[in-house]
Image: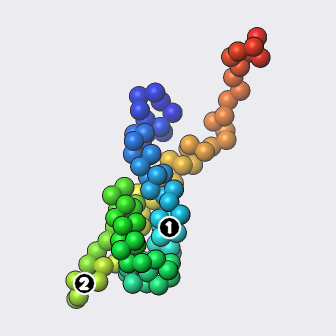
């Protein structure tokens, strides 16, 4: 971690936005489902039992933080297929592994009365 607004190479605001997006239970379910492979919104509505408008909202939030991408069907543009951005997933996996690495925990002298 560094004090200039970055944690392990990522701006704190960006990391906070990604974690906030994934902190919603429905968005986490959507993201986990998309990690299993590309799908269309109709499959997501059916599998996750979410109304289409709520699903669209959650997909938009995940897209805005760069975790999910969507593309229109080449034959029928009304269909949209969603997928996890592989590069973003790899970046955030590495970031979380570094952040949560127990080897980084240091023993430091305590402040206050116990720190003597």
Residue 14 found in image quarter: top left
Badge nearest the viewer, 2 or 1 = 1
The kind of secondary structure element at disc 2 is: loop
Instruction: Judge the density around disc 2: few (<14), some (14-19), many (≥20) Cα neighbours within 10 Å.
Output: few
Q: Position of residue 45 (x, y in %)?
A: 44, 81
Residue 11 found in image quarter: top left
The answer to whether any part of residue 91 appears in the image is no
Q: Position of residue 85 (x, y in %)?
A: 39, 64
Q: Residue furthest bottom?
A: 75
Residue in the picture at 51% in, 33% down: 1
> Compared to 110, does 66 lie above or below?
below
> Compared to 44, does 21 lie above or below?
above
For the residues labelled 2 and 1, the Cα–Cα distance comes to: 24 Å
Q: Compare residues 32 and 104 and report the one nearer the observer.
A: 32
Q: Position of residue 16 (x, y in %)?
A: 45, 45
Q: Position of residue 92 (x, y in %)?
A: 47, 52
Identify the colour scheme used.
rainbow
In the rendered picture of this protein, how many numbered marks are placed on residues? 2
Apparent side of residue 13 relative to residue 73 in the rendered image (left or right) = right
Q: Compare residues 37 and 57 and report the one nearer the observer.
A: 57
Residue in the picture at 43% in, 39% down: 12
Residue bearing the label numbered 1: 26
Q: Are marks 2 and 1 in contact (CB under 8 Å)?
A: no
Instruction: Judge the density around disc 1: few (<14), some (14-19), many (≥20) Cα neighbours within 10 Å.
Output: some
Residue bearing the label numbered 2: 78
> Compared to 68, does 9 lie above or below?
above
The answer to whether any part of residue 21 appears in the image is yes
């Amino acid at each position: 971690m560094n004090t200039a607004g970055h944690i392990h190479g990522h701006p704190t605001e960006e990391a906070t936005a990604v974690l906030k997006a994934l902190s919603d239970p429905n968005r986490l379910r959507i993201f986990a489902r998309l990690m299993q492979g590309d799908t269309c919104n109709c499959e997501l509505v059916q599998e996750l039992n979410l109304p289409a408008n709520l699903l669209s909202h959650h997909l938009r939030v995940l897209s805005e933080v760069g975790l999910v991408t969507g593309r229109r069907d080449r034959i029928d543009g009304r269909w949209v297929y969603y997928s996890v951005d592989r590069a973003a997933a790899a970046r955030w996996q590495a970031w979380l592994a570094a952040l949560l690495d127990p080897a980084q925990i240091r023993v430091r002298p305590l402040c206050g009365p116990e720190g003597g």
